[in-house]
Image: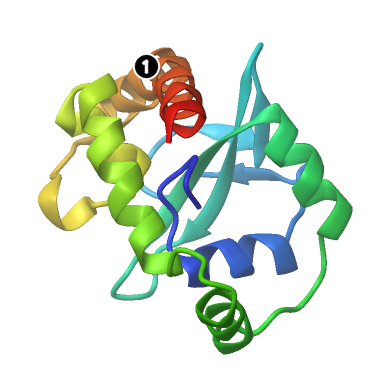
Amino acid sequence: MLEGGLRLSHTLHMIENFSPEEVIEIPNTAIATKRLVCFDSFCRYYVGIRETMKPCEWTYLSKETMEMIRGIAGARMRRQVIQKYAREHGLLPPKTMRKISWRLMIKAMPREVARFIQSRFGELKISEARYEDLLSEADQHYPRYLERLQRELRIG
């Protein structure tokens, strides 16, 4: 959640429905791609939640986190159980992780790209051509965010 700014519900959906080899066509674009695309230091995964009030298209994460997800893929977890666990063990509430991710993300990349990565589409109106631009810009800027996140976590 911290690496990609995902909501807890989207994270759980991705884990439960993980299908990295599936080829999908992104609605309203001419883009066909595998759900999982990996680069040198990170991966992006097409979550593809569009029908809800809180959409989620892509999640970006480190290769290490992607390997962890592969290990638990298909698992069904309840949001309330995770929230209770975090509360009982003095951990950050899951929704706080998204806020922290946002604050660090906008320090490492343009706000429009951060909005795209976090699927803040209510704040972002984009055409099909701009969608493709933002996808490649997100791919370009994300490694800087990961580096910043790792630095911040070591200091804290």
Q: Quadrant of residue 54?
A: bottom left
At horizontal 50% and vertical 52% (from top left) the residue drawn is 1
Looking at the rendered structure, the secondary structure element under dot 1 is helix
Vertical placement of 30 versus 91: above or below? above
Against 3, residue 93 (above or below) is below
Q: Residue at 63% across / 16% down in the picture?
A: 41
Q: Amino acid at mark 1?
A: His
Q: Position of residue 24 (x, y in %)?
A: 62, 45
Tell how many labels: 1
Q: 126 and 79: which one is in front? A: 79
The location of residue 144, given as percent across then percent down, is 40, 15
In x, y percent, where is residue 152? 41, 29
Residue drawn at point x = 34 percent, y = 17 percent: 137
Quadrant in which the C terminus appears = top left
In the picture of the structure, the residue carrying the numbered disc 1 is 141
> In this view of the protein, which residue sits in the foreground, 30 or 130?
130
Q: Residue furthest right?
A: 71
Q: Is residue 47 left or right of residue 38?
A: left
Say above or below: 10 vs 76.
above
Q: Nearer the viewer, residue 155 or 35?
A: 155
